[in-house]
């Protein structure tokens, strides 16, 4: 909830705006004051939708506190207390998914540079892809500027989209060159910067923060943690379905291990897909806004007949 608290403080100082931002999140008013509550990936995606509708796709540039090093929890502490820039970037790529479950940062080495490539575990609408990508690299830039000082201007940021009208402001915040229309979303760091010793190096703090990150990653890989992350990935998939092999790769597991962890949690992968499809079907049927054929298509059924059979199976037990 820490991100959400920051967003509310920045964008909903007027209490009248709160309903607009929390619409569809399934949160009660008391939940907003619980710092220990975790938002699911699906809730985060809906929140980004609400912000986009209210403020446009440049809202992320107005959320400085959201991507400041202090807001990144144990990840920020581990990166900022590293000994060298290379070590800091390795920590960032290794544990980014602990902080933002759907996002990945992968290091690709070249002769004279390394590429910190951004990707998503599950597909998102275009505006959410931009929000996720911009947020990650604004946070990365904020950390590098503090750690490297003027040398951080040598980092190049590459984005697959075309330049938005607020490009000059984004350029100022990132501090480095921007390339638009690139093949991937990435930060390109000269190899010469990696050996720079960092001013905030603190081995004790670094090891403590790494311990927190490792325990969080292990919890995510425990049976209930794996189940929750699979449910989040399915909830944010356009059709409610994802190939199990892709989900296993996203979680850093083999398919066999994924099956075993879900079995230990008392479910199968098919059960979780079924539950997600049932939830969506129930919501859309209750709204009456879509026909059976339209719902069937959205849920990935071959035809309306297959969807009708699924409905009889899902809802028979409740009747």
Image (cartoon, grey):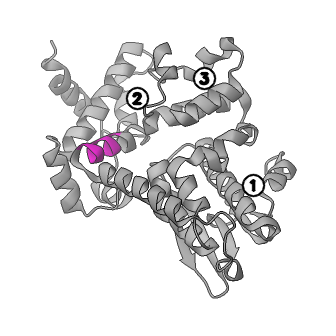
Horizontal side of residue 260 vs 144, given as left or right:
left
* Nearest to the observer: residue 65 or residue 17: 65
Can you tell which mark lies on residue 162? 1
- Secondary structure category for the residue under label 3: helix
- The mark nearer the N terminus, 2 or 1, is 1
Question: Where residue 208 sits in the image (x, y, percent)?
Answer: 45, 57
Q: Which residue is mark 3?
A: 21
Main SS, magenta region, reads helix
Q: Which residues are magenta?
A: 224-231
x then y, percent, for residue 31: 46, 20
- Check if residue 204 falls in the magenta segment: no
Category of crowding for the residue at label 3, using alpha-carbon neighbours closer than 10 angstroms: few (below 14), some (14–19), many (at least 20): many
Q: Foreground mark, 3 or 1?
A: 3
Spatial distance from mark 3 to mark 1, Cα to Cα?
27 Å
Give the left or right position of residue 90, taking residue 271 as reference.
right
Circle 2: element type: helix
- Whether residue 303 appears in this view of the structure is yes
Q: Residue at x 83, y 45 (%)?
A: 166
Is 43 displayed left or right of 231 in the figure?
right
Residue 193, relative to residue 42: is it above or below?
A: below
Query: Separation of disc 3 and disc 2 at Cα?
Result: 28 Å
Where is residue 245, by image quadrant?
Answer: bottom left
The residue at 66%/13% (across/down) is 15
Q: Badge 2: how crowded within 10 Å, few (<14), some, or many (20+)?
A: some
Going from N to C along the chain, the mark reached first, 3 or 1, is 3
Mark 2 to mark 1 CA distance (whole Å): 33 Å
Q: Give residue 78's position: percent from left, percent from top.
A: 53, 59
Looking at the image, which is closer to me, 29 or 48? 29
């Amino acid at each position: 909830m820490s991100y959400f608290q920051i967003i509310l403080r920045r964008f909903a100082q007027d209490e009248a705006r709160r309903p607009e931002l929390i619409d569809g999140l399934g949160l009660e008013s008391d939940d907003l004051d619980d710092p220990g509550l975790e938002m699911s990936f699906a809730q985060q995606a809906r929140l980004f939708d609400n912000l986009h509708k209210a403020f446009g796709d440049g809202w992320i540039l107005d959320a400085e506190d959201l991507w400041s090093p202090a807001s990144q929890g144990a990840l920020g502490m581990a990166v900022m207390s590293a000994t060298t820039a290379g070590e800091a970037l390795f920590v960032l790529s290794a544990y980014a998914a602990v902080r933002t479950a759907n996002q990945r940062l992968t290091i690709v080495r070249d002769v004279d540079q390394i590429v910190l490539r951004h990707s998503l575990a599950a597909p998102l609408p275009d505006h959410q892809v931009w929000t996720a990508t911009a947020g990650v690299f604004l946070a990365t830039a904020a950390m590098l500027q503090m750690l490297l000082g003027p040398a951080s201007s040598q980092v190049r940021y590459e984005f697959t989209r075309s330049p938005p009208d607020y490009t000059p402001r984004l350029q100022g915040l990132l501090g480095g060159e921007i390339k638009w229309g690139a093949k991937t979303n990435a930060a390109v760091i000269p190899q010469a910067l990696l050996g720079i010793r960092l001013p905030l190096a603190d081995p004790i703090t670094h090891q403590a923060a790494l311990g927190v990150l490792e325990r969080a990653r292990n919890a995510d890989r425990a049976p209930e943690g794996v189940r929750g992350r699979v449910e989040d990935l399915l909830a944010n998939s356009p059709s409610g379905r994802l190939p199990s092999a892709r989900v296993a790769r996203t979680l850093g597991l083999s398919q066999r291990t994924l099956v075993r962890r879900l079995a230990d949690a008392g479910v199968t992968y098919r059960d979780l897909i079924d539950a997600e499809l049932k939830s969506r079907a129930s919501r859309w049927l209750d709204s009456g806004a879509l026909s059976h054929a339209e719902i069937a298509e959205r849920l990935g059924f071959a035809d309306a007949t297959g969807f009708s059979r699924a409905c009889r199976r899902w809802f028979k037990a409740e009747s």
